Image: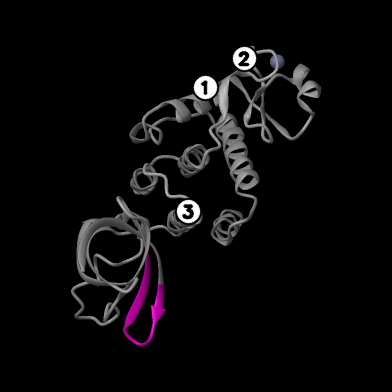
Amino acid sequence: MFFKTRAIVLREVDYKDHDRILTLLSEDRGLLTVKARGVKSKSSKLKVACQLFAFSEFTIFENRGFHTVREAVPVELFAGLRVEMERYALASYISQTAEVLSQEDSPSQLPLLVLHALHALCGDGSEALIKAAYELRLCALAGFWPDVDGCCVCGKEDADRFDVMNGCLICSGCRAEAGGGISLPLSPGSRDALRYILESPVSSIFRFRLGAASEKELSDLAETYLLRRMERGFTTLDFYKSLKLS
Ligand SMILES: [Zn+2]
């Protein structure tokens, strides 16, 4: 049986001399594992559309649960990602987190979020903000939508911290009442950015700027929240951070 689907190549693993096994995030079928035969040979017609992070239209042959790529036509290759090591590493982290989330549940908005994040990484926007916006919306898609209307104890809109364990805003004075778990500081600038990221269409969340201090605050918050909620680390994140330090 054949079917067509548009999908992003999240991961590739070499298989035998000329083949690769690809992990695809499909627009309408969630996560797919497919074999791309002969894709490593120079003359392969699949080569371009099957490369890492490509968004392509795939024609796939399915037989007893195994999938093989028959044709692939590139839609968007995100060539800009291959120019800079740090952006490439961040794209790998985006891919890994998207794959992990898709293994349990595949929210229908996830391919769109990944596509917009990769697209943003090809531009000149701040890497830290792209990463933070992606992490926060990923958590939201995973069912951990933070409550950012006001303090989760007293309701005050200008709460000055983010409660990581409860996923909500909280004032310094209300922390004890909420159990006193981990909370991070939130300036007015990063609080507005947090609301913007969670309340805007996915197509808009990678288009904004923030002062350096607020950017740092928002980055720490988004990463801490994601790691706590996913209850695991990511090798791609460790690698990305090692590049930032070097
Ligand atoms: Zn409060």
For the point 64% across and 13% down, the residue is 155
Location of mark 3 (residue): 90
Whichever of callouts 3 and 2 sits on the residue coming sooner in the sequence is: 3
How far is mark 3 from mark 2, CA to CA? Answer: 32 Å
Which of 17/230 is in front? Answer: 230
Q: Classify mark 2: helix, strand or loop.
A: loop
Location of mark 1 (residue): 192
**For residue 95, which quarter of the picture?**
bottom left
**Disc nearest the viewer among 3 and 2:** 2
Q: Is residue 52 magenta?
A: no
Location of mark 2 (residue): 158
Q: Are marks 3 and 2 in contact (CB under 8 Å)?
A: no
Which of 244/51 is in front? Answer: 51
Which of 83/159 is in front? Answer: 159
Which residue appears farthest toward the bottom when viewing the image?
A: 17
Amino acid type at circle 2 is: Asp
- Picture coordinates of residue 180 (x, y %)? 79, 29
State which quarter of the image contains the N terminus.
Answer: bottom left
Whichever of callouts 3 and 1 sits on the residue coming sooner in the sequence is: 3
Amino acid type at circle 3 is: Leu
Q: Is residue 16 magenta?
A: yes
- Picture coordinates of residue 187 (x, y %)? 62, 23
Q: Classify mark 3: helix, strand or loop.
A: helix
Amino acid type at circle 1 is: Asp
In this image, 232 relative to 138: left or right? right
Picture layout, residue 36 above or below residue 189: below
Q: Which residues are magenta?
A: 13-23
- Count how many numbered circles sit on residues in the image: 3
Magenta stretch, main secondary structure class: strand
Whichever of callouts 1 and 2 sits on the residue coming sooner in the sequence is: 2
